[in-house]
Image (spheres, rainbow, N blue to C red):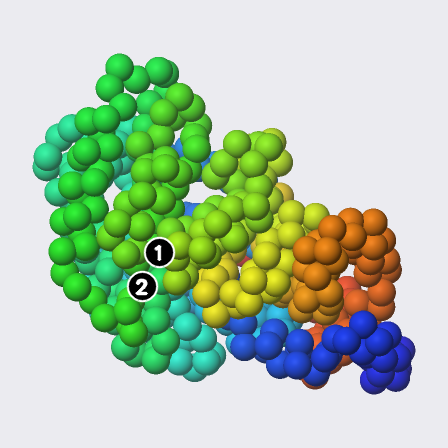
Amino acid sequence: MDINKRFQSAKEDYEELGIDVEKALEKLSKVKISIQCWQGDDITGFEVEERSLSGGIGVTGNYPGKARNPEELRKDLEKALSLIPGKHKVNLHAIYAETNGIAVDRDEIEPKHFQNWVYWAKKMGLGLDFNPTLFSHPKAKGATLSHPNEDIRNFWIEHCKRSRKIGKYFGKELGQPCLTNIWIPDGFKDIPSDRLTPRKRLKDSLDKIFEEKIDEKYNIDSVESKLFGIGVESYTVGSHEFYMNYAAKNNKIYLLDTGHFHPTEVISDKISSMLLFNDKIALHVSRPVRWDSDHVITFNDELQEIAKEIVRNDALNRVIIGLDFFDASINRIAAWVLGTRNMIKALLFALLLPNDELKKLQEEEDFTKRLVLMEELKSYPFGDIWNYYCHINNVPIQDEWYGIVKKYEKEELLKRI
């Protein structure tokens, strides 16, 4: 395949629509996707005391090659990143602390427990994001920040305070802000008799967590809602309305997760509304199948609509894009590569659309031509532009990356069985 020749031909097609392809590629090169580390080890983490998943989180499958320690996880991430165009970020949970075999509970974690991640990120030219881990712990049964027991609430408040300090450490060391995102699994399986009191406690806990002001040059705070989870089907304390209002009132980033709403809701429809009232928003992109199942994202309609909303609203610098899928039924490195490439691919597809013309047609109420153009654009030679972008970023085109992953699986992953 003559990549350059096909690129030039495709470029001419898009230029006839008024698209500056080179400018689109330049914009794309500046986008950082926050890649979730937990795809590589099924959200096990490296705490000294092994704990089973809880909080409505489940990982299915037993594909060979799961990372068993920090070194293996970082090695696997390096392999995945070598197959993904661009420079990005890695998203960590608190359970990925390295404590040298010493039991350190979550209200005791410190920046020093993440020094190896910082050294590695510097070597790789990456940023780091962070999440306190408020699940899979003896003190996370049923509730955390909204728990009726003050001692348990204080434990988790302290954990979140320390997490923000770790985020600040990441930001200072790596020269780019860390997004520290709070999600909790609190709620009730059956219909509650009091919805207000747990939310009052959650609000009070968040107020205490955010008492210390941290420069957003280093750490950015976000809060993440959810509709329901396994074991909390009837009521979730940290609902969409709760966090949207809390974020707005307290100048925090609101994070939308693609799997955290009703099955018929899509976050692509929410992005423009959120951008009207917020300087920035954050996303966790996964693929829900009937519920928050966190499948690997595919190049489907909703992913494309999310990317279109970001691009057409000139919000590439205002939307913090993170990924949040974890599938243990397939090769975990392939999951990272496929999902991240699809996110980048969707953004490129959106950047190559004549968005101004499409907006103009809508304003003129020429809905026929709008629909015709939107449909015809689906068969434009977008793939040739994508292959060229991969080529100039020195990563494999099309599915060539899969052979490299299979080779790594044979040489590295299968030895872990």
Mark 1: few, some, or many residues within 10 Å (few <14, many ≥20)?
Answer: many
Which residue is at a point 23% across and 26% down the rendered structure image? 196
> Can residue 79 be seen in the rendering of this structure?
no
Residue 75 placement (x, y as % from top left)? 50, 69
Q: Which of marks 2 and 1 is in front?
A: 1
Q: Residue at x 25, y 58 (%)?
A: 163
Q: Is residue 376 above or below residue 224?
A: below
Location of mark 2 (residue): 220
Q: Closer to the camera, 104 or 286?
A: 286
Q: Distance between the residues labelled 2 and 1?
A: 8 Å
Left or right relative to 392: residue 154: left
Total tally of numbered discs in the picture:
2
Seen in the picture, residue 243 relative to 395 is either above or below; the reply is above
Left or right, 307 with reference to 57: right
Residue at image location 59% in from the left, 32% down from the top = 264
Q: Is residue 197 among what the camera can see?
A: yes
Residue 253: mark in rendering:
1
First in sequence, mark 2 or 1: give its number: 2
Single out the residue that lies furthest toward the left.
Answer: 151
Q: Which kind of residue does numbered mark 2 sit on?
A: Ile
Q: In the rendered image, which quarter contains the N terminus?
A: bottom right
- Identify the amino acid type marked 1: Ile
Locate residue 233, reporting x and y percent: 42, 24
Q: Where is residue 120 in the image (x, y as percent from the top left)?
A: 40, 75
Report which quarter residue 203 is drawn in.
top left
Residue at screen point 50% across, 36% down: 261
Residue that lies at the very extreme toward the front in this rendered image: 364
Nearest the viewer among 101 and 18 is 18
Horizontal arrangement in the rendering, residue 378 relative to residue 288 (left or right)? right
Crowd tier of the residue under label 2, counting other residues whose Cα lies within 10 Å: few below 14, some 14–19, many 20 or above: many
Give yes or no for contact between labels 2 and 1 (Cβ–Cβ under 8 Å). Answer: yes
